[in-house]
Image: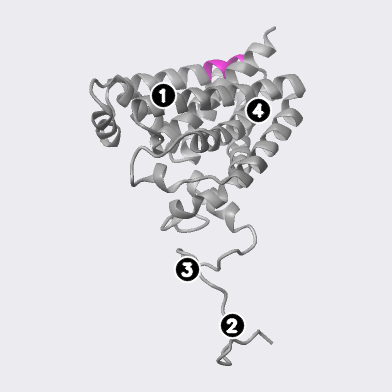
Amino acid sequence: HPPLDADGTPHRRPLDADGAPDGRPLDGAALALTFLTVIPIRPRRGVAADLGRAAVWFPAVGALVGLLAGAVRTCSAALFGPAVASVLALVVLVAVTGALHQDGLADCADGLGVRGDRKRRLAVMRDSAIGAFGTLALLGWALLLVGALATLSDHAALRALVTAAIVGRWAALVHATATATARADGLGASFTVARAPLIVASAATIVAAVLIDGPVDGLASVAAGAAVAGIASAWARRALGGRTGDTLGATVALAEVAVCLTLLAFATT
């Protein structure tokens, strides 16, 4: 029999902002998967406000995204060659995330290129139109990623994509904890990461990178992601006054490229 409340009625578990029982098993995983991908596990309504508690699952979602893109790269290489297969992997990487991080990268590039104060940069970044700097940033990101993946062997490219996706999402957590919010509203303001989830996510990222790529390459990949997070945080504080949803997305995209280039450098030496 279900437990009863003081008035004799059956006890009901509290509901969260989405109408789902609060604290149910793997609720954080579903929350992270819904936000970071286009997989509709849960409605997006109310997700941003609770996303911080799902931060521990970011590396796991990254592993899934990287595995999907890496599988396409590996399986299609025999048919189309490494260059076309790498382009297809990039398409999957963007499609499965709904271009969430690429949109942030383009907006940050437009904000970086604009002349004016912080208010002007933030206004430009909130504009849905992509300017010349944003277009060039996306083009450079795509070329670097495809170039790195096409040069790596099939198995190495698979490992690189999985590691890059894991480290990229962890780098966003580091960026979130290293910066204040630039706006009073938006994802940057609502997404806060507590110390415990960050520690767990960091440990999971390091262990995963080492298991996938080995101690040297794995730790170098994590260091590359940390460097991107540090640079992005320093720029966000100086140019914008803190983080926004766009700087979080840009950190993921840039860290992915940095990891792939790092692994390529180790593979060719």
Q: How far apart are marks 2 and 4 (CA)?
A: 49 Å
Q: Name the residue under label 1.
A: 235
Q: Tag 1 or tag 4, which sits nearer the N-term?
A: 4
The one nearer the camera, 131 or 198, is: 198
| Disc number lying in front (2 or 4) | 2
| Disc number lying in front (3 or 2) | 2
Residue pictured at 50% horizontal, 50% vertical: 51
Q: Is residue 20 above or below residue 94?
A: below
Q: Please state which amino acid type lies under the numbered disc 2.
A: His
User: Could you tell me if the residues under marks 4 and 1 are in contact, i.e. CB atoms within 8 Å?
Assistant: no
Q: Residue 148: within the magenta?
A: yes
Q: How far apart are marks 3 and 1 (CA)?
A: 38 Å
Q: Tag 3 or tag 4, which sits nearer the N-term?
A: 3
The residues colored magenta run 146-151
Residue pictured at 64% horizontal, 26% vertical: 222
Q: Please state which amino acid type lies under the numbered disc 1.
A: Trp
User: Could you tell me if the residues under marks 4 and 3 are in contact, i.e. CB atoms within 8 Å?
Assistant: no
Q: How far apart are marks 3 and 2 (CA)?
A: 16 Å
Q: Tag 1 or tag 2, which sits nearer the N-term?
A: 2
Q: How crowded is mark 4: few (under 14 residues within 10 Å), some or many (20 or more)?
A: many
Q: Name the residue under label 4.
A: 158
Q: How crowded is mark 3: few (under 14 residues within 10 Å), some or many (20 or more)?
A: few
Q: Which mark is residue 11?
A: 2
Q: Please state which amino acid type lies under the numbered disc 3.
A: Gly
Q: Name the residue under label 3.
A: 19
The image quarter containing residue 212 is top right
Is residue 81 in view?
Answer: no
